[in-house]
């Protein structure tokens, strides 16, 4: 269930960022996308570190 919530949140954030890019608001779109990527990469690295321990 929590995986589905992450997917839905990623879709909404990505769609919002694409809409901002389409409207010409690049800085907020880049902030949304970089935060989203940072969250997912950090979460993935945290899971790898937990499995290794």
Image: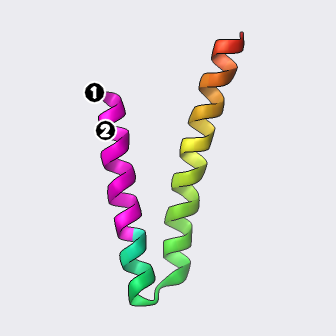
- For label 2, the residue is 5
Residue 51 falls in image quadrant: top right
Tell me the residue at 56%/52% (across/down). 37
Evaluate if marks 1 and 2 touch, with contact meaning CB atoms under 8 Å apart.
Answer: yes
For the residue carrying disc 2, how many other residues have a C-alpha within 10 Å: few (<14), some (14-19), or many (20+)? few
Dot 1 crowding, Cα within 10 Å, few <14, some 14–19, many 20+ = few
Disc 1 element = loop
At 59% from the left and 24% from the top, the residue drawn is 47
Q: Position of residue 21 (x, y in %)?
A: 45, 81
The quarter of the picture where residue 4 lies is top left
Q: Closest to the observer: 42 or 4?
A: 4
User: Which residues fall within the magenta stretch?
Assistant: 1-16
Secondary structure under the numbered disc 2 in the rendered image: helix
Measuring from the top left, give residue 20's x and y in whole percent: 40, 79
- Check the image and report above or below for 15 versus 52: below
Tag of residue 19:
none
Residue displayed at 39% across by 51% down: 10
> Which residue is painted at 35% across and 43% down in the image?
7
Q: In this view, does 7 lie to the left or right of 27?
A: left
Q: Name the residue under label 1.
A: 1
Confirm whether the magenta stretch covers residue 46: no
Percent position of residue 33, x then y: 52, 63
Q: In this view, does 9 lie to the left or right of 31?
A: left
- Asked whether residue 10 is drawn in magenta, I would say yes
Residue found farthest to the bottom: 24
Q: In this view, does 41 lie above or below 36?
A: above
């Amino acid at each position: 269930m929590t995986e589905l919530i992450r997917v839905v949140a990623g879709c909404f954030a990505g769609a919002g960022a694409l809409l901002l890019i389409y409207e010409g608001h690049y800085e907020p779109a880049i902030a949304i996308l970089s935060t989203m990527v940072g969250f997912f990469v950090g979460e993935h690295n945290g899971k790898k570190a937990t499995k290794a321990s």
